[in-house]
Amino acid sequence: MTNWKIWTLRVLGIIALLLGLALTIGGVWLIALGGSWFYAIAGIAMMVIGFDVFRRRSLALWVAYGLLIVDLLWSFWEVGFDFWQLVPRIMVFLVFALVVSIVSPALRKKNGEKSFSAMFATVSSVVLAIAVIAVLANMPRPHALVTASGEKSPVVYSDAGKDSGNDWPAWGRNTKGNRYAQFDQINKSNVKDLKVAWTYHTGDLAVDGAEYQVTPLKVDDTVYLCTPLNKVIALDATTGTEKWRYDPKPQIFQSTKGWKRCRGVGYTDLTEQYRQASANHSVQTDDNGNSSNNSAALPSACLKRIVVTTIDARLFTLDAETGKLCEGFGDNGFVDLTVGLTKEPPTSDQGSYNITSAPLVADGVIVVGGRLNDNLTVGEPSGVVRGFDAITGKILWAWDAARGAKDSTPLPAGQTYAPETPNFWGTAAYDPKLHLVYFPTGNQTPDFWTGNRHPYSDEYNDSIVAVDIKTGKEVWHFRTANRDQFDYDVSSQPILYDLPRPDGSVVPVVIQLTKRGEIFVLDRRNGQPVYPVEQRAVATDAMPGMNVAPTQPFSALSVGTERLKESDMWGATIFDQLVCRIAFKSMRWEGEWTPLSDKKRTLIFPGYYGGMNWGGGAIDAATGTLIVNDIRMAQWGRFIKQDVAVKIGLKPTTEGEYSTQTGTPWGVERSMFVSPLGIPCFKPPFGSLTAIDLVTGKTKWQVPLGSIQDAPVHGFVPGVYIPVGMPTMGGPLVTGGGLTFFHGSLDYYIRAFDSDTGKELWRGRLPVGGQGAPMSYIGKDGKQYIVAVVGGATRTGTNKNRSDLVIAYSLPDNK
């Protein structure tokens, strides 16, 4: 045998020895932690293979085959036929068996005789190569978690969506927040033919902490949207030509320097409110007691208004036709939303209170909450929710957790609402029949320390609250967490739906998605669960001074909430999977709600980004099918003394890996649970799209959402389309054409799925990623349009791959 062949075998042998040694050492460590024995056994087998290859012994091939067989048996026993769970378990040993098979003609028996013929080596190598190719060939296709039966969902409401006509007049299309458009011009049979109809650039790039998360509105023939810096823009709905723009020039404070967002604007037609107001103020009585109505003419401007909130905590309205400020609103056109709030504590960032989400506008009332800094300090301003007159901007009511159901009247001038109350930072929903507004609440900040919680904060944290739209008087509230210690604030817009029940009755429900992945379906008249909610015991071994709840509510409906176990740990290879298993076994983990400690890291799953975040879900209002996208990212957290954090160089932020929680005994360090390679330490998908039949409660289908193609890991972009399912942002759009559209994945695509099966029917390449929610309307030309605002995927951490693009799709004229 030539020297280069000998040295090739020796190099292969050394590689196998070293990898086997690493597996053995790690495997013994895992055994010591009470974990699986397989890795240590596999490591020893690999060292035997390496030693025998180095010595050119034929035993290497038989050990490689034996290891592969044992590996397959063990893998199927642990994870069944879960493709992405099998890949890291089998690929290394499959490739090793292939390599040893290829070099097998060079291996010898103890007596030096040749062991394997060229024919044997060729056949075995071909078989193993086919197996490797089969695994690789299955990587570019999605692997459903729940496969659809193929049955088409029956229509429950044939007139669903028609109340909004050809428009999209509210952030969730209507005040019920269902994100459903009844249009069927674009459907399953022709969606593949979608083309770009028009594009528009706003001029505000999503850079330096700005993110495009906006869902536009469309009224008559105008599309309305806002930029992260609150510029409001009106476009022609059929051509994308700019009609007008308005810049409120918000102040940028320290708190909003890296957090600039405008998720949407509101719209209202005040014709009826003006007529009522005019009539109420112009009724006169003569000497005989007879009344006469001398109502004034309707105003020539600002009858139809765009309602806007800003990142410097202002509220204003614009004439929808001209874009001019409605100067009769508030004080010179603006309402200062910081009035009635306490000042930020000295340890907080200036501008802590700001608005990022679209306001609800209904029945002449504007309903707004506000965003606060999380985790920096105690003493943050109130989380008060307020209603304002849409004509005058006058405050009508103010609900805050400190007063709860007792009183919702606005405080007199000079008085302030109680600080530290749970806030509402999303978009509310409204039932015009019940005259009730529904909004979700967050948590008293700092989020991770519960030793200083007010009783009213515990009562209203992570809740759904129903109030009267005219008075703000609370009718009921429901907690989705008994005492939140993980920033599980409920942020998605509630979805209102009239739900047919198996017994033939119809229950008006509110559907609340949560970061925990729990889906609460409640009777929106009284807050009683329609799908069962169970109080389950959770871990309570908390730090001294912490107050944790002994039980937490769990719904009969949920997505991605299965309890993580050791066999769920994942990796690109068997080696980083082993590292993740060691990390998992080294953490505190007694299931969801395991309290944080200062001794070692505690696993947090579901993670505090979701589950379901602010983007919310959509419902096919015709069939009662709920469509939700979720995030499945485990995290870890640990308490740390503030002075220790300073010494080791941790920099405090509200959203980063360390927060001071000033005013409490502990800061909190936290991060994603990832491997040394920078990929998640738990099984895919890391984001999915799920369809749930709300009539039966059954999951119809569940598919991974998004590929690794454009997602950077340690600065490296894979560039290959492998749809494992990635963390999502934004929300879906459902149409009467049987389609679900989505573009908030980490790769640069907008997609259309079959709403009955979850099958991807169309995928359009984008210049950058997106993180809002698409919308749809019919233009004056009779065409159906799908519109998305694309500014870049969420939190890339750089100004690269960012945009300011508005893009509209339609079918070609001949389709």
Image (spheres, helix red, strand yellow):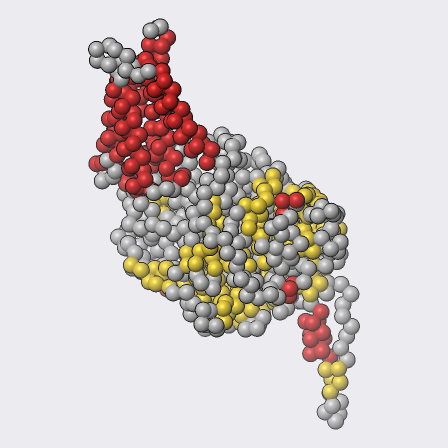
Residue 454 visible from this viewpoint: no
Q: Is residue 114 left or right of residue 162?
A: left
| Relative height, residue 334 to residue 74 (above, below) | below
Percent of width and height locating residue 535: 33, 62
313 or 59: nearer the viewer:
59
Position in image of residue 176 (x %, y %): 56, 63
Q: Residue at x 61, y 57 (%)?
A: 736
Q: How many marks?
A: 0
Q: Is residue 136 visible?
A: yes
Residue 675 vs residue 655, the one in the foreground? 675
Direction bottom: furthest residue? 288
Which residue is depicted at the point 61% across and 55% down? 737
Residue depicted at 38% across the width and 44% down the height: 635
- Can you name the residue that lies furthest to the front here? 119
In which quadrant will I find the N terminus?
A: top left
- Residue 682 lies, in percent from the top left, at 37, 41
User: Measured from the top left, where is residue 670 in percent x and y?
Assistant: 38, 43
Give the answer, above or below, for where 330 lies relative to 233: below
Q: Considering depth in this image, is 518 or 651 the residue closer to the camera?
A: 518
Residue at horizontal 24 percent and vertical 31 percent from the top: 40
